[in-house]
Image (cartoon, grey):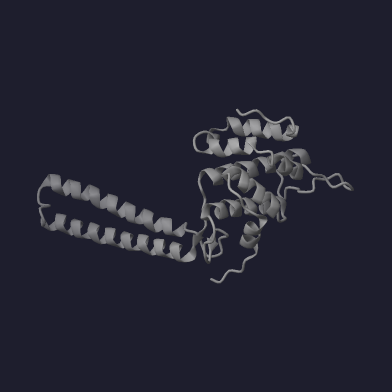
Amino acid sequence: MPKISEETPDPIKRILKGIDRHPRTFGPHRAAFEKLMNDRRMQEVYGQFLRRDRQTGEFYYRPQNPKAGHTPEEAQVTAIREILQLSISAAADKIAVSKYEQIEAAKQRWLDEAKRLRLLANDVELAAELGLLGVDDPASVALASEHIEVARRFANWLEHLTSGLRRSDDPLVVARISGDPVVRGVQTMIAVKLKEQFGRRCDGIAAILTSVVLGAETTPRVSRAALTRKKTR
């Protein structure tokens, strides 16, 4: 594990040690984790996460849905851990934004392929029943039956995939792609997670986290635009 800076607050040190031991931090996730560990800009982020209201003593950024029985400190640590893990995963997986037209084109391709697979399965099934096209011996009939089922299962899977494609109201769906689509995608995911956790916009924190885990420059404007833009579809 990379050395943790002495400046890092103790609650964050415990989080980082836990993430370091997590199985998902191996492989491609490791590079993003080490960037996060070695970048001094993270001290500003940690300071914001642990900042308290001077009048009430409560965390300035408070988790919206803490687990029952958690103290405010435990809830805060859980929220911070989830945000850091999400940032690492999004960077490692290179989450990118996509245009609505690209998604619709992919959906139509998969539906067309599913239809062709079903037609092919029906043709082979009929050939096996009538002993046509060389499917006229027990071994060929058995193979045909096996492959027919595979084709139909694959068609079902393609149709299922279309139901999970991004919708027009997804923050990762954009009207046009400007700049690096991965930077924009990762920053949008982090910004959405921050708002989900704390119930408020944290565009500056999202920009720093994105810059750190990707090693790329960005600004708060990217997530600000993603979370405020009006949908046209």
Q: Position of residue 73 (x, y in %)?
A: 77, 39
| Count of numbered marks | 0
Q: Position of residue 42 (x, y in %)?
A: 69, 41
Query: Please, is residue 75 above or below residue 104 in the view?
Result: above
Q: Quadrant of residue 34?
A: top right
Q: Tell me the quadrant of the picture where the N terminus can be found.
A: top right
- In the rendered structure, the answer to whether residue 129 lies left or right of residue 5 reads left
Q: Quadrant of residue 179?
A: bottom right
Q: Position of residue 165 (x, y in %)?
A: 47, 58
- In the rendered structure, the answer to whether residue 60 lies left or right of residue 233 reads right
Q: For the point 50% across and 45% down, which residue is it?
A: 93
Extreme residue toward the right, this view: 55
Q: For the point 41% across and 56% down, which residue is it?
A: 160
Q: For the point 52% across and 33% down, which residue is it?
A: 26
Q: Position of residue 130 (x, y in %)?
A: 12, 58
Can residue 68 be seen by looking at this rendering? Answer: no
Can residue 190 be seen by looking at this rendering? Answer: yes
Q: For the point 50% across and 38% down, which residue is it?
A: 28
Residue situated in front as seen by the camera: 82 or 10: 10
- In the rendered structure, the answer to whether residue 11 lies left or right of residue 153 reads right
Residue situated in front as seen by the camera: 226 or 134: 226
Query: Please, is residue 223 above or below residue 69 in the view?
Result: below
Extreme residue toward the front, this view: 217
- In the rendered structure, the answer to whether residue 158 lies left or right of residue 182 reads left
Residue situated in front as seen by the camera: 110 or 171: 171
